[in-house]
Image (cartoon, grey):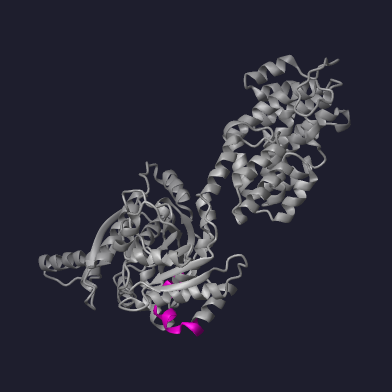
Amino acid sequence: MKQRHCRLILLLMLLPMLLLTSCGPLPGELSRPEATESTLLPEAESLAARGLYARAAELYRRNAKTSDQAAHYWLRATELMLLARGYAQATDDLAAITEDQLKPLAITRKRIAEAELALYAEDYIGIIQALAEQDSKNNLKAAQLRHAELLVAAYSALNKPLEQIKARAQLSKWLTSSAKTNNEQQLWQLLKTVDSEQLDSWQAAAIQPLSGWAALAQTWRVSYSAQTDFRRAISDWRVRYRQHPISKNLLNQILQQMRRHIPAPQHIAIVLPLTGDYAKEGLAILAGIEAAAELSTETDYRPELRSYDSESRSLTALNKYREAVSEGADFVIGAYTPGTLKLFARQSKLKVPLLALSQFKSNHSLPKNLFQFALNETDQAQQVAQRAISDKHRRAIIITPDTAWGSELAESFKLEFERLAGTVLTTQIYQSAEKDHSESLKQALHISQSEQRNRELRKALGIRPTFEPRRRQDVDMVFLLSEPATARLLRPQIDFYYATDLAVYSTSRIFSGIQNIARDRDIDSTIYCDMPWILQTDASTDLLRDVLMITATDSYNYAPRLTALGIDAYRIPNELGRLMNSGEHTYNGVTGELRLIQDGYLKSQLSFAKFRKGRARPLNKTPSLAEIEAMVLVDDSITLQPAHESTTR
């Protein structure tokens, strides 16, 4: 907002001098022919030059009452009150203008002032209406710049991408430095979403620079799909549009993105444990892959699939990858242990891309064709911490089992929660093999301490006073780590120990993924994170579920989340190019909102739900991490440390 107001100040200070002394300049030409009568008051402009806009406006206002230049004086008063942010007075001054007394270029100024007031009022339709009859190409550069900026603001707010593209294309002619870069980046991202028919229409219209932008987007699209020589295509485009205002930086970025482009594969090898100890897991993933392939609506993505059993002892994992490549695979999907995955990570180069359905963290650079996609529980713990902070919780206790995974997730939650200005008061470990966890919960909630104080009081007074244990009051949430069966024991006990008002959060491990209303009533009110496949329904996912229940009932019921992993594993190869070309691009998969980060790791943003009457009911979307951090900075006035990366699985 501050930057926009600075630009407005410059514009409204320059426009009267550039426009009112002009007689129909050429586009962008700052001509200054002699004026027979000045419509500027030197004393007022001197005040304005010192930033005293309201006083300068008052001088114009007083003179307007007696001058034959009244309309021009009221207009200048309006502009100065806009600079002073006196929007109510600017509205009154604007209303006093008799428009038929204004010259054409002064009318341009009036329309811009009307649009500025509409922008202040967030009346985006009003901006468009104010500028509708203005042909900006006959205005000077300052007016054309602001005209385009106002239209961009309006069309962006109204979510009208085609109109926004046209406005940004005009704006690209006038901006410089960082503002030009930002506008070009947004324009290019919008252009990539436009269909080919619309791009052809803009190109044929030959209205510059929009026609050139459309031609570039069409060139990119054709080369992207056909894998043609994009550098030559760009060179040819540059020859055709020599005067186009695109920056060299953006062209270089586009070229670099195309070099990283991974084409959609035609032959995918699938390496999974189809026999042995992990056959059930492997078959669940394979069921998801095959169901996604069967129901795919992507006409240009129909790869041939070939399965390999990773448990076969005939070849090592690395040699099995090489065998698949030698048999024609141009993409490999494989489930490997972290130890096996390290063998691939040590390779200087992988001939074809590998999507590993597991993850490990390395201190060294990884082969560029290695991608990691896993159901990562430590990520879940971090996202629970972020959600709890966004829900205004700041003081937590952790209740975790005596297991390695419990310890790892508890630590992951603690690190992120405390990074975001929360406090973990205690971590209470319970014995996972036991059925009664009352002592652990009493310790965590300080019920034991309350009971001890009562015993001491009874002993000191020699009487039995009426007593009701009181839980600790310094906590506002619980992070509960548990398997489903244990959670059904722990969750009611938390309420029993006077903690019904505490928010309880958990990860997807608390729920099997298969609905059991009668039993899951015991975990009512628990907030937890899970993949959209489990929490949300729509026509396409319902159809996939129906197919899985018919063709792979046992696999789906055994591991529904692994079948979802298989569904996304089939779809991701067709999305990798887009994910690689923009750090902002995400893919809405059935496992979550996927984004490609460092080391080829696909990070999934999960959804949240709350159990009510035995059902997981989806909650509103969690704010982004940047939004949560901004909220914490405002609420807590602290300095945040950099975000933690997920640890080795």
Residue at the image point whose x is 34% and y is 79% from the top = 275
Seen from this angle, which residue lies furthest right?
Answer: 100
Q: From the image, which quarter does the C terminus lie in?
A: bottom left
Seen from this angle, which residue lies furthest front?
Answer: 326
In the depicted structure, whether residue 586 falls above or below residue 460: above
In the depicted structure, whether residue 407 falls above or below residue 161: below
Q: Position of residue 333 (x, y in %)?
A: 43, 66
Q: Does 583 sit left or right of 24 as displayed?
A: left
Res 272 → quadrant: bottom left
Residue at the image point whose x is 58% and y is 66% from the top = 301
Q: Position of residue 559 (x, y in %)?
A: 40, 76
User: Does residue 25 show up magenta in the picture?
Assistant: no
Asked if residue 596 shows in the view, the reply is yes
Residue at the image point whose x is 81% and y is 37% from the top = 135
The stretch in magenta equals 549-565
Q: From the image, which quarter does the N terminus lie in?
A: top right
- SS majority, magenta: helix
Residue at the image point whose x is 81% and y is 28% from the top = 106
Res 153 → quadrant: top right
